[in-house]
Amino acid sequence: MKYLFVCAIGPVQDFIATARRSRDLWYGSWMLSELSKAAAKKVDVLFPKSLVFPDPALLETGSRLNVPNKISAIFEEDPGQRGEEVREAVAFRMEELGEDALKPVKDRIDYPLAQQQIKDLLEFYWVSVPFQSDKDYPEARDRAEALLAARKATRDFKQAKGMCPNPRWMGHANRLFQNLNTRREMSLSLRRKRKSKTFTGITMPVRVSNSQAWIC
């Protein structure tokens, strides 16, 4: 008995909907690629030579390959809780990216709230479908895609964190800066540093529940 494992990583549409600059779109795409690499590497460690896509040879350190947000593999045994281990690997990579993004403004924001928003940002879904032989693979693939689509359509609702009021342009997301003047000052300061080529920070999307706020 073989098992087709398929996982999807998100969000995708939220990044597109909330992006205000082309840089935001680029970062969202790059971040999803990095998370997909983390998932693929973990699958390759748990079940060597099981990846269908992407090719593990392209996941080496320093590779500039962009990986789509869907990973597939064929296991020779029931994956059981292995999917959760893949999720943990993706979440760990997400935390690393979050730390890098928050470092330049760590002392001027609500840092615990920012960390919570980053934890709530990740979307990870996985399914596993058994099949007997290679001729059954197409049917197993169709079933796995249908199950994955159904799971993604089943929304997870979490308690929103944070209590500070928000400006209109942020919808119902909780801002990380304590007041708008501080945010404007930080934005101007970071722009000056970029112009002087002394700042190498990046934009990081953070979210409370299904809403997002941006650190620029």
Image (cartoon, helix red, strand yellow):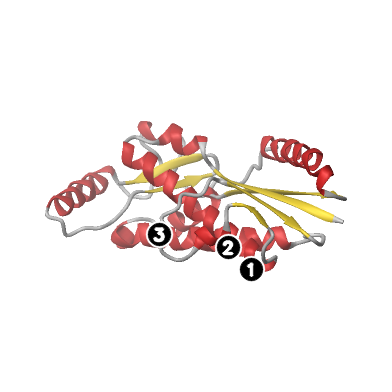
Separation (CA) of disc 1 from disc 3: 33 Å
The label number, if any, that marks residue 111 in the structure image: 3
Residue 130: x and y in percent read: 84, 50
- Left/right placement of residue 206 relative to residue 216 reads right
Label 2 element class: helix
Residue 169 lies in quadrant: top left
Separation (CA) of disc 2 from disc 1: 6 Å
Of the pair 39 and 181, the residue shown nearer to us? 39
Label 1 element class: helix
Residue 34: x and y in percent read: 48, 55
Please identify, in this view, whether the residue under mark 2 or under mark 3 is nearer the observer. Answer: 2
Q: Amino acid at mark 1?
A: Val
Mark 1 touches mark 3? (CB < 8 Å): no
Circle 1 packing at 10 Å, graded few (<14), some (14-19), many (20+), is few
The label number, if any, that marks residue 45 in the structure image: 1
Instruction: Report the residue that reaches farthest toward the left.
Output: 196
Mark 2 touches mark 1? (CB < 8 Å): yes
